[in-house]
Each structure stands twice: as C-alpha cells, then as structure tokens.
Amino acid sequence: MYRPEAATVNGAGSPPAEPAPDESAGPLDARSTIDLRADEAAERVRSVLDALDAELVGLAGVKRRIRETAALLMVDRARARFGLSASKPSLHMSFTGGPGTGKTTVALRMAEILHALGYLRVPRVYPVTRDDLVGQFIGHTAPKTKEALARAAGGVLFIDEAYYLYRPDNERDYGQEAIEILLQEMESARGSLVVIFAGYEDRMETFFSSNPGLSSRVAHHIEFEDYTTGELAEIAELMLTRDDYRLSEQGRAAFLEYLDRRRAMPRFANARSVRNALERARLRQANRLVAGHGQVGRDDLMLITEQDVRGSRVFIDPLETGLEDPAV
Amino acid sequence: MYLRHGSFSYLPELTDDEIAAQIRYALLNGWPVSLEYTDDPHPRNVYWEMWGLPMFDLTEPDGVLREIDECRATFPGHYIRMLAYDAKLGRQTIMMSFIVHRPAREPGFRLDRGEGSNRTQRYSVYSYATETPSGDRYRRDVR
C-alpha cells in the first residue's frame, strides 16, 4: 500500500503527533519519581537548545527566556504524568526587537521545541504579514484570516510586524476584525496552533496597549536586544565560514571599523545588514579578481581583503557625497 | 433509510477524529479537499452545492474540520460530503469522497416500475425527500 508519510519531507509527518501529556498509562504512583533528564522529549529539546546556542551569537536574554519556557513546559508534562492539575499552558508569544535580531530564526527553534514537547503537531512556522490576514473590503477579512489559520494549523503562526494589524487612525480599518478572529482562535481550547507576534519594540508596545485583550493572552514576551559590534563581527565570521570565505587580518580590522560606522547610520538592521555588507564585499572581491591578472588560486577565491571591505560607500563621508542611504 | 454514498458508507459513522485522519491522508497525498452539501441525495444527482472553494495549500486537517462544523451549523438538515481531488496529470479526478453529515431522519427512496414500448420495463428511483420543495426538505426533522 502506498504510504504518503514515507514520502513527505523531513518533519512533516514524523515523529508521530502525540498528545501533550502522556496519560495512556494512567497517573503515576505518588511516591514514584521520574527523571526529567531521561525523558526522550527532553533529549530532543536539549539538542534544539544546543543548536540555538551554536548558531545564534549573543542574545543571552532570549536564550535564557527560551530555556525557562522549555523547562516550564517539561515540568508541566511531568506534572501531568502524576495526574496533577495541568491546564493547557498558554503558549502564545510576542517577540520584540530591532530588525535583523533573529526573531524569525528563534521562532523556528521555538517551533521545534514545542513540537518535541508535543504541544505542536509539526515543527513548522507559517509567516504572515498584515496583507495575508486583512482583506480589502467588507467580508473579505474573515475568510482570509481563517485561511491563514488553517494553513498554520498544527504549527506556529508567525505574524511579522504585527502592529500593522491595528490602525488607530482609521476607524473603518478591517485590522480589528482580524485581531478578533485571532483572539477567538487563541482562546479556543481546541486550537492547535501557537501565535507569535513579532515587531519592533516601541510600536509593539503601543499595539499591545491599544489591544489589552491581546496582550493578556500573550503569556511570553521575549525581547531581542540589538547586537554589539563584537557580536556582529562574530556573526560575520560565522556567515563567511559557512560560505567558505575568510577575511584577511586587515580586512577584519576594516570590517570592525565598517560596523562602527554603519551602526551610526539610519536603517541599520543588525545581522541582516551584516549579511548585505558581506554580499557586497563578495561582489567587490569578484570584481577585483576578474579585473586582475587572471591567475587565481583557491586562497584568492576564499579571501576577502581590506580593499574589498573599504570599497563600501560607508567609508565615504556622507556629508561630502550627500548620499541618502550609504548602505545601498 | 440510511443513505449509502461514497467511501466508508457500510462502516459505522466516522467520528470527527477519524474524519480528520482521512483528511490528513488526502492532504499528505497533495489532494485539495472541498465540501459539498445537498438536500436531494438522489443517486443520479452528482452535482451537489459547493461549500466555499476547495481548500488549497493545507497541511493539517484542522481548517477542513472547522469548515465542516460551520457547514453542519448552517445546514443541519442536509447531507454534507467531503471530496479530495487529485490534480495530477493523468488523474484529474476525485480520489476520495465520503459523507460527513446526514439529516436526523432520512425518508429514503422508492423504486418505480414503468411500462415502456414493446413491454420493456423501465425503472426509476424516486426520492421521497423531493416531495417538499428544495430548501424545505428534512426541515421538520431538524432538532
């Protein structure tokens, strides 16, 4: 017989969905103990947390919050096995922080943790923005929001720039309708999905304060701090190593200087800006190699020199050139 | 008379969890699921009313179950079936279809025999439900 489960991509069907508390064997004896570390789910959570540590630089506060949340859920599971009161914990979250601070990446990891603990059926994140939830005319919003909820079912609905849902300046805006449907879904006990609201800190603040019903149903508020220059440099090293590139000694120093200058400029987007800067450095490296004497070795292809970094317009005084956005 | 229509019709009625499992199977195969309803379940009536558009791009059955519940609430006295359509080239047909909701009481059908030319017998199926106009059928059974 054809079994489609076998053909699906990794994660879509396996491991099999299990109900959060394992109650099949009945509550445990009051005197027995269980080893939280020996739990198979705990093992998977730990591997996800380790991956989080390995691939995300800095973000100490965020990592601590995620560990705490994971610990809470693991204890909830253990309580359920003893037959102790285990109301379904509220898992909806808000991620606030500047652009490029890793909110989406952490959301992916969060989905994996929740899946490992059995609170989600699939470790999948369905990202949406206002356009996917709010309609253009009366009666358009509800079906759109419900469609997005149906697609995210069993996983995480990640609402990026959630504050755009609510437009206080336009009282006929349909965003409020979308928020109400979301609230309904978040309230319902049958709901199988976790909603994560993400956005810049100050605007999320006003968003939540103007929707008190929403903020009270979001249990976990996690703040993402901006990276320091040192952390950004570390991120750059990680990105380059992953793509088989490396910076020369002078190049590294130049890049630090670049980061300092770039941070002071408008529209700085942390890790995303670093990635874009490296993209452009690679572009200049390729240009230099092609324009050069033609003979290249393996090292030449890997090395990004000071010249490639200093070619950036960030090093030109913006007052002299009058450039609006030096990063482009 | 208990209507036998589509897959699983000789099994006990599927629970919502079983319906969800069947829908999951369809979605894993990449078949979009749609819902249809009717109050004229004559075997030759293949065109039932569509409940919204087919639900594309789903991976989990929750959305379909929600629509089934909504359709049940709107048409408690109708038959509702789910369809799973395979759009693959060479198939392009319904791969699975079964009833997910039926009215409380089903009046059933009558077999009419008619005399044709040259003593041929012609048979037709008459649905008792069609004695009342469309929309009013099964209404008195709604609880």
Image: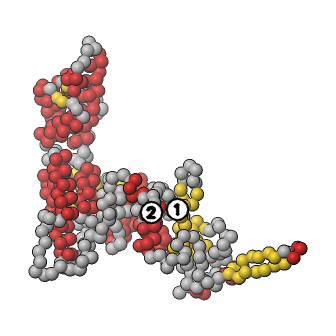
In the picture of the structure, the residue carrying the numbered disc 2 is B25
Residue A178 can be seen, yes or no: yes
Q: Which mark is residue A229?
A: none
Q: Chain of mark 1?
A: B
Mark found first going from the N terminus, 2 or 1: 2
Q: Chain of mark 2?
A: B
The answer to which of A16 and A79 lies nearer the viewer is A16
Q: Is residue A320 left or right of residue B24?
A: left
Q: Residues within 10 Å of mark 1 (few under 14, many from 20)?
A: many
Q: Which mark is residue B84?
A: 1
Q: Position of residue B38 (x, y in %)?
A: 61, 73
The answer to which of A237 and A35 lies nearer the viewer is A35
Q: CA distance from mark 2 to mark 1?
A: 10 Å
Q: Amino acid at mark 1?
A: Ala
Q: Nearer the viewer, mark 2 or mark 1?
A: 2
- Tell me where residue B139 sits by quadrant: bottom right
The residue sitting at 14% across, 42% down in the picture is A231
Label 1 element class = strand
Residue A69 can be seen, yes or no: no
Give the position of the N terminus of chain B as an image quadrant: bottom right
Label 2 element class = helix
The answer to which of A226 and A118 lies nearer the viewer is A118
The answer to which of A315 and A126 lies nearer the viewer is A126
State yes or no: discs 2 and 1 in contact (Cβ < 8 Å): no
Q: Position of residue A317 (x, y in %)?
A: 20, 27
Q: Residues within 10 Å of mark 2 (few under 14, many from 20)?
A: some
Q: Is residue A147 left or right of residue A91?
A: right
